[in-house]
Every structure is written in structure tokens, then in C-alpha cells.
Image: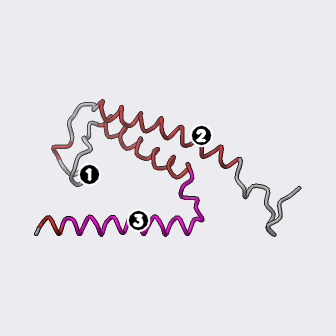
Amino acid sequence: MERIVAIQVLTALLAVVIAWHWFSYRRSRGRTWSSLWGAFTATAVSMLFVVAGALGYRLEGGVPFTIAAAWSGTVLWPEIWVGIGVALIAIYLWYRGLRSLRRSPWQGATPGGQHRP
């Protein structure tokens, strides 16, 4: 019985994530697939891992920053390396996202919709 409830909860959670993504994609006219969205997310994740690793906090299950056993008291190099790896991905996504802004189809458009010569 517990397994069925877990599957139902997982299915409901997946349905909510899919519906939210569809809603945000439709509302943003497709801009959620932009590299800038990934760049913002990767930057935040990299900062989380680097800071947590430098402070000695193990990112494990549970409520963050309330579990006394999660604080190790030493620098956690694996978390810092994960943060650096994600930062490299963020740099690439920032590069692609900022380049796409220069080539934006909305650039140079007038309020009436015609492009300037």
C-alpha cells in the first residue's frame, strides 16, 4: 500500500512539473529554452555547492542548515569540485545566452512591428 501511495505522489509531482513547464513556456513565448535560463540556474547551483563545501556543510537529505550532523568542520573538496564543474557549464551558458541576445529577432524592431532599414 505504501508503494502505491509513493507512486501516486511521484506521478502527481511529475504532472505538476510538466504542467508548470508548459505554462511558463507558453507565457514566455518559448524563451524558457533560452541559454540564459540555464545560466541563471547553473550559477545559483554552483554558488550553493562552492559556499557549502567551503563552509563544511554536507548537502544531503533533510532540512538544510538544521541538521547538526551535516556540519563537518572541514572543507569538503568534492562539493567544491562539483561547484566548479557547474560553474564551467554556467560560463558556457552565459556565453551562448549573451550571444543570442545580440542576434535577437526583436532587436531593431519598431513599436509598429516593422524593422528599421
Position of residue 52 in the picture relative to residue 4 (left or right): right
What amino acid is found at the position of numbered circle 2 in the picture? Answer: Tyr
**Element class at badge 2:** helix
**Vertical order, 19 against 74 (above or below):** below
**At which x and y percent is residue 40?**
50, 49
Q: Quadrant of residue 47?
A: top left
**Vertical order, 17 against 70 (above or below):** below
What amino acid is found at the position of numbered circle 3 in the picture? Answer: Ile
For the residues bearing labels 3 and 1, Cβ distance under 8 angstroms: no
What amino acid is found at the position of numbered circle 1 in the picture? Answer: Pro
- Mark 3 vs mark 1: in front: 3
**At which x and y percent is residue 36?**
56, 50
Find the magenta span and give its range: 6-34
Position of residue 65 in the picture relative to residue 112 (left or right): left
Residue 76 falls inside the magenta stretch: no
Residue 32 falls inside the magenta stretch: yes
Q: Which residue is mark 1?
A: 64
**Vertical order, 31 against 68 (above or below):** below
Q: Which residue is mark 2?
A: 95
Residue under the point 27% across and 44% down: 59
Spatial CA span between label 1 and label 2:
32 Å
Q: How would you rate the neighbour count of disc 1 (Cα within 10 Å): few for under 14, some for 14-19, many for 20 or more?
A: few
